[in-house]
Structures are given as structure tokens and as C-alpha cells.
Image (spheres, rainbow, N blue to C red):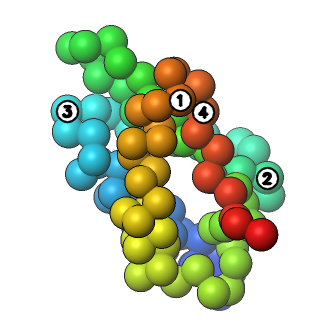
């Protein structure tokens, strides 16, 4: 596995863990079919019928400066879970800030 692939997998794990902590009782599914564009997460709660969606830009995952620690801070300080809840069932698209 090359450095970029390892960094992407490490960042995806951080995001997955954050989502599971933020959405208790939700199941997470991922769509990796849009490789080199984005990675999507769907959180579903069978009991409540709620769904929340996150689309993560590929450049955010692959950027060399985005270490797992930096990704964790960006998720928490950026309020990603709250922004997902406010998206009203649509995807919240988490991109790199330019």
C-alpha cells in the first residue's frame, strides 16, 4: 500500500469512528464507487427511520497535510455531525477549504 492509500484509509477510519460516536444507534454504509471524486457515508437508524449522509471530497482524504489528528480536529471543530443533521436528508458535502 502506498503512502496516499494508507493516508486515505487512516482518514476514513477516523471519519467512520467520529460518525459512530456522533450518531448512536445508527448503522453506517459506505459507497466507494466514486473513487477519485468523493467517498460517501450514509447513517441509518432503523428504529427512527432517520438517514444522514456525508460526502467527503477525495482531495480532503488524500491531501498530504491531512493527518488523522488533523482530520479529527476538523470533524469536531467544523461541527460536521451537526451540519449533516441540518442537511435535511441531503448529503452534507465536506470539501477542502480553499
Which secondary structure, mark 4? strand
Which secondary structure, mark 3? loop
Q: Can you give x and y, in whole percent of width and height, for residue 15 in the image? A: 44, 59
In the image, which is nearer the foreground, mark 1 or mark 3? 1
Residue sitting at x 48%, y 80%: 70
Q: Which residue is mark 3?
A: 25
The 10 Å Cα crowd at callout 1, few under 14, some 14 to 19, many 20 or more, is some
Name the one closer to the observer, 6 or 16.
16
- Find the distance from the CA under tag 4 to the CA under tag 1: 7 Å
Which mark is first along the chain, 4 or 3?
3
Mark identifier at residue 11: none
Which mark is first along the chain, 3 or 1?
3
- Above-or-below relation of 50 to 76: above
**Res 59 → quadrant:** bottom right
Q: Is residue 92 left or right of residue 49?
A: right
Q: Which residue is mark 4?
A: 91
Q: Are marks 4 and 1 in contact (CB under 8 Å)?
A: yes
- Find the distance from the CA under tag 2 to the CA under tag 3: 29 Å
Q: Which residue is mark 2?
A: 37
Q: Are marks 4 and 2 in contact (CB under 8 Å)?
A: no
In the image, which is nearer the foreground, mark 4 or mark 2? 4
Amino acid at each position: 500500500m502506498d503512502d496516499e492509500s494508507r493516508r486515505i484509509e487512516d482518514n476514513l477510519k477516523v471519519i467512520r469512528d467520529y460518525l459512530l460516536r456522533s450518531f448512536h444507534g445508527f448503522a453506517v454504509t459506505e459507497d466507494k464507487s466514486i473513487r477519485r471524486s468523493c467517498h460517501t457515508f450514509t447513517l441509518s437508524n432503523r428504529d427512527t427511520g432517520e438517514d444522514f449522509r456525508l460526502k467527503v471530497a477525495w482531495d480532503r482524504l488524500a491531501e498530504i497535510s491531512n493527518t488523522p489528528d488533523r482530520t479529527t480536529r476538523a470533524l469536531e471543530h467544523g461541527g460536521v455531525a451537526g451540519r449533516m443533521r441540518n442537511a435535511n436528508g441531503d448529503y452534507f458535502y465536506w470539501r477542502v477549504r480553499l
